[in-house]
Image (cartoon, rainbow, N blue to C red):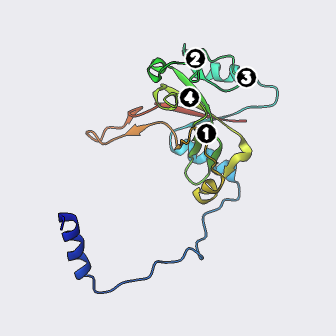
Amino acid sequence: MSNKEDILNKIRRNIHQTFDMPTLDNLKPITYKNTLQQFVDMSHTVGAQVAELQPGQDLNEIIHKLYPEAKVFASNVAGLSIASLNPDTVSQAQELNGTDVGIVEGKVGVAENGCIWIPQTMKERAVCFISEYLVILLDRHAVVNNMHEAYSRIQMSDYGYGCFISGPSKTADIAQALVMGAQAARGVTVILI
């Protein structure tokens, strides 16, 4: 018998009372009167910027105004002329190193925590994590109240990968000093379209 089995058997022998698994029938996920405003507020709370595309505005101009110092923009989003690097055409992910701004499309925004579901729609998903700054394009009508609603809307892409991103990457596990961009983008902007 392995150490693991030995430990589990000792635990089983010392269980004196058991309980049935609770049902989720009475679960009432959180909802909001103004889901979009809650999403914007939560996005700010987690450190993201939020901009709205107004009728007649050019998306390329908005992104350039947000990041005027950026030189390398990477995206495979159709219609973006600002992108000088396409994650679908690089031969390996390392070629995306040095990307100032990555631009991706989000599919579902979640009001309760400000996160956005981003399915992999590009060959090299590293653009989501290697870029200094990340711009996420999100349909304003694709914002839901909670994670329960979000999971019911998720559809996997052909690549079979996706992730939730909520604001910039941050950690304070070293000397309790907040570091932005520790594992991914140090700044995130959500553009509601």
Where's residue 7, x and y in %? 20, 70
Left or right: 183 in relation to 191: left
**Secondary structure beneath disc 4?**
loop
Mark sitting earlier along the chain (4/1): 4
Mark 1 vs mark 2, CA separation in Å: 22 Å
Q: Residues within 10 Å of mark 4 (few under 14, many from 20)?
A: some
Label number found at residue 123? 4
Mark 3 vs mark 1, CA separation in Å: 22 Å
**Secondary structure beneath disc 3?**
loop
Left or right: 56 in relation to 29: right
Residue type of the residue flagged with mark 2: Leu
Picture quarter with the C terminus: top right
Residue type of the residue flagged with mark 4: Lys
Look at 58% across and 23% down and name the residue there.
Answer: 88
Mark sitting earlier along the chain (1/2): 2
Residues under numbered marks 1 and 2 in contact, where contact means CB atoms less than 8 Å apart: no
Q: Residues within 10 Å of mark 3 (few under 14, many from 20)?
A: few
**Vertically, is 14 above or below 127?**
below
Label number found at residue 85? 2
